[in-house]
Image: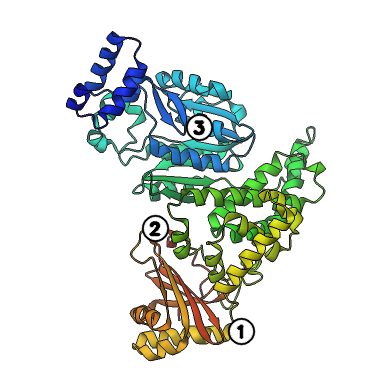
Amino acid sequence: MERLRAAGCVFAEEEADLLVAAATDDGHLAELVARRAAGEPLEHVVGWAEFCGLRVEVGAGAFVPRRRSEFLAEEAVALAGPGAVVLDLCCGVGALGAAVASQVPGGVELHAADIDPAALAYARRNMAPYGGAVWEGDLYGALPAGLRGRVDVLVVNAPYVPTEEIGLMPSEARDHEPLVSLDGGADGLDVHRRVAADAVRWLAPGGRLLIETSARQAPLTASALTSGGLSVRAVTSEERYATVVIGTAPVTAPVTPTVAASVTASGTASVTASLAERFEEHRSRLRAVSYRMLGSLSEADDAVQEAWLRLDRTDATGIENLGGWLTTVVSRVCLNLLRSREQRREDPMERAETRVPDPLIGSERRIDPEQEVLLADSVGLALMVVMESLSPAERLAFVLHDMFAVPFDEIAPLIEKTSAATRQLATRARRKVRAQAPAPDPDLARQREAVDAFFAAARDGRFEALVSVLDPDVVLRSDGGVGGALTVVLGGARTVAGQAVTYGSLSPFVRPALINGAAGVVVVRKDRAVSVMAFTVVGGKIVAIDVLSDPERLKSLDLTALDPQG
């Protein structure tokens, strides 16, 4: 232990225990200690690394899987259903693929590829318990042609360290891990771009590419995926300092009659076309269910895509009620995402109080048909905010029953409750929603009048006029992102008015808009959204103001629906 401490090992006592456990005798122990004291990674010395609860075999000359990459594995598990085709590209020792395969109920069809033969020797052993097929070669060039167009989840931990920064890495990495697993080129993203460029050819319709990157490089990684034809979102883990960009492949367009006729010997194309057409009939409703369950447009799209993937792998001839079947599937996907989200939060209630869901931005003059489905039944942003505080089971019961009239006896199996218990969950959720999110005035003109009066008073600095347009118990919730200075909750007319006076400087940049079907504004400077403000107006008074000011989330907003300025 003293020798380890002298070598600078911070956790000398814990490392000593691991070395003793790995040694076969005193001579072997002395050899292991010498290797570790010389700076060799502990995982190389003992021959394994812990990853997602697995003991993954590693050794000299192999890239050691990082604990932050467990976040990448968790995101992949959340998207991989039973029987999914999973590809671990740039797999190294195969830790990601093994972790995903070990955690998906029912198992997956597992494939992996890497250019480093030394790493692949470990990958074959790590993936053997899950029947994984391991291929050697450069990216997609290593793969069998039969895998093209079949991959449901493509998980990638490619090198993303810029060449000039390799020398800044810890010596354990730069001196003992292969350069090919570290060096990502001039800006670190050479391999990311190559992965993104051909991903659509290998992904199944609606399949996902998940790629680890850094927070600094995420916009460029996302741009590469977008250029590759994928719809993109990014997720982060503050706890692990991890960032993952997720790209979703488009669902296959309906097969044309010409193409269908050319393959009718198998009947596959015509069946797929018919199934895709039937699915599209339900897409808008499924997206509405998912959005209300999740409060995230990108996650809602992912849930709908997952429903398609599961339908495409199912014998649909035995499904009597396709709409009901799809609603059940998408509800299960959303429930899993909600539970995963809740587990990742350090303080779920604290974050729920300030998290403002993705807003639906529309024009007061015209409403997009797809948004009209999402906005049916007046799902205002304030109501969506309150639903963030519900438990996953409460939210599912409330959304499905109260918003989509799904009977309790059909909801109960989804949350493994009795019908009576499910009814109680919905009742409890309904009480919370009604207490904290009162129904807004149905007259949109009256809502707009109150909002205009608010900004006029703020612009002129008339404090008492601001107070007069606010309900005495008004609540202002601002979401500036996790830990953001603009993330606050304020209550009371005079307190909110004091804060609102500062909004006067924003008046020249205010663009009126429908926010989730109610009067609101988008503050736009130089064609960039600075904030979105949704107002709940009851009896001519503003009872709630919900503000999204998180710069990262604002970047993804579609502002094309806004009415022209002036």
SS for callout 3: helix
How far across and down, in percent of the image, does residue 181 sit? Answer: 36, 29
Say left or right for 435 vs 452: right
Viewport quadrant of the C terminus: bottom left
Task: Give 205 or 171, whichever is nearer the viewer.
Answer: 171
Q: Earlier in the sequence, mark 1 or mark 3?
A: 3
In the rendered structure, which disc, 2 or 3, sits on the residue that comes first in sequence? Answer: 3
| Foreground label between 1 and 2 | 2
- Identified at 36% across, 88% down, the residue is 463
Label 1 Cα crowd, 10 Å radius (few <14 / some 14-19 / many 20+): few
In contact (CB < 8 Å): disc 1 and disc 2: no
Inter-mark Cα distance, 1 to 3: 53 Å
**Mark 2 element type:** loop
Circle 3 residue: 99
Determine whether, in the image, residue 12 is placed left or right of residue 480: left
Picture residue at 32% right of the left edge, 36% below the top: 185
Q: Hey, what amino acid is under mark 3?
A: Ala
Instruction: Name the residue rendered at 62%, 72% in the picture.
Output: 378
Residue 443: mark in rendering: 1
Instruction: Calculate the distance from the C-alpha at mark 1 to the C-alpha at mark 2.
Output: 35 Å
Q: Position of residue 400 (x, y in %)?
A: 68, 60
Q: Which mark is residue 141?
A: none
Sequence-first tag of 1 and 2: 1
Q: Could you classify mark 2 by the number of other residues whose Cα lies within 10 Å: few (under 14), some (14-19), or many (20 or more)?
A: few
> In the rendered image, is residue 28 in sight?
yes
- Side of 38 relative to 78 (left or right): left
Inspect the image, locate mark 1, and give the three-letter code of the amino acid beneath it: Asp
The residue carrying mark 2 is 482
